[in-house]
Image: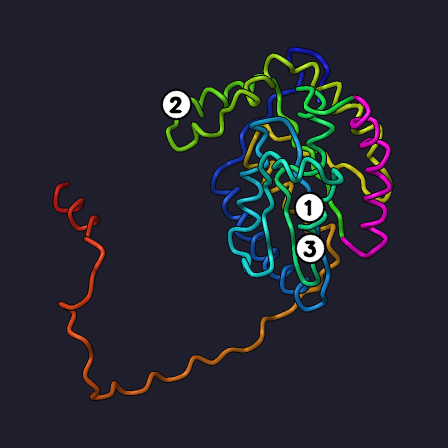
Amino acid sequence: MSGSKKSTKKKNKRLDKALYEAELTRLQVELVTMQRWVASTGARVLVLFEGRDAAGKGGAIKRIVQYLNPRSVRVVALPTPSEREAGQWYYQRYIERLPTAGEIVLMDRSWYNRAGVEKVMEYCTAEQYDRFLEQTPTLERMLVDDGIILVKYWFSVSDTEQEKRFKSRLKDPVRRWKLSETDLASITRWEDYSRAKDAMFAATDTPQAPWWTVESDDKRSSRLNTIAHLLSQVPYEQSEPAAVTIPDRPDASDADRPDFDEQNFVPDHARTLAAAS
């Protein structure tokens, strides 16, 4: 991420939609295969998604989990700490949500909140911030040494693209909730966030837990790039699902069934809509 106010990135042409959808489908099939390997081997996968507001983290996460078995994949997006959590060891509420054997956990923002928004918005003290930068490499080394596959992504978006996405959310009633005062402060404090990100990388981009930057001005490209890279970080093997035979349906019995008139049905809104069109 550039430290300058104005973006100097060369704007890439948006990836063709048909090409994007075809490759996304292929990669999502691979994700299903990868998850099957994780479940069968008892592997533990932890993926951290960080970056500026409106950088595309949520969209990438949605495409990753879209067809995965929800019983063994979790998305963790924690709210502001409660009073009780604020009194805990800083990492504690994240540690509680680490993956168990056979599980994939995707964190939509993680303990790195302390190095970003908490630092910039002064939600933590200087002492807490310095301690975080010192302790985090040790924590992550412990996770990796214990066998967790840890992948850290930083989604990088230009200032012009971020502002464009903010304006789009402002006009969209189903995404308006994504705009908070803290989100909008990322515009006026762009430089502060740039310096915080640089300091975070300098302290926590380690050989055992490196940062991977995702250029995300083109959402389609960033999603494909993220999924393809994630697949490359998990040493899964190709396998076929267990064979399944769909049995013949038995003949209906002569037992009496309750009368339909005794049941409550959801009103057919779709039919009413079609009739009015």
Q: Nearer the viewer, mark 3 or mark 2?
A: 3
Q: Is residue 134 magenta?
A: yes
Tag shown at residue 64 = none
- The mark nearer the N terminus, 1 or 2, is 1
- Residue ID at (50%, 45%): 21
What amino acid does circle 1 point to? Val
Tag shown at residue 99 = 3
Q: CA gap, disc 3 to disc 1?
A: 10 Å
Determine which quarter of the picture holds residue 38.
Answer: bottom right
Magenta region? 126-148
Determine which quarter of the picture holds residue 93.
Answer: top right
Image coordinates of residue 65 in percent, x first then y, are 55, 51
- The mark nearer the N terminus, 3 or 1, is 1
Local crowd at mark 2 within 10 Å, few (<14), some, or many (≥20)?
Answer: few
Q: Nearer the viewer, mark 3 or mark 1?
A: 3
Which quadrant does the C terminus fall into? top left
Find out whether the residues at labels 3 and 1 contact each other: C-beta distance under 8 Å: no
Q: CA gap, disc 3 to disc 2?
A: 37 Å
Q: Secondary structure at mark 1?
A: strand
In depth, the one of 105 and 117 nearer the eye is 117
- The mark nearer the N terminus, 3 or 2, is 3
What amino acid does circle 3 point to? Pro
Determine which quarter of the picture holds residue 250.
Answer: bottom left
- Magenta stretch, main secondary structure, is helix
Image coordinates of residue 106 in percent, x first then y, are 63, 47
Q: Which residue has dot 1 on it?
A: 47
Tag shown at residue 171 = 2
Q: Is residue 127 above or below residue 245?
A: above
Local crowd at mark 3 within 10 Å, few (<14), some, or many (≥20)?
Answer: many
Q: CA gap, disc 1 to disc 2?
A: 31 Å
Image coordinates of residue 10 in percent, x first then y, are 64, 20
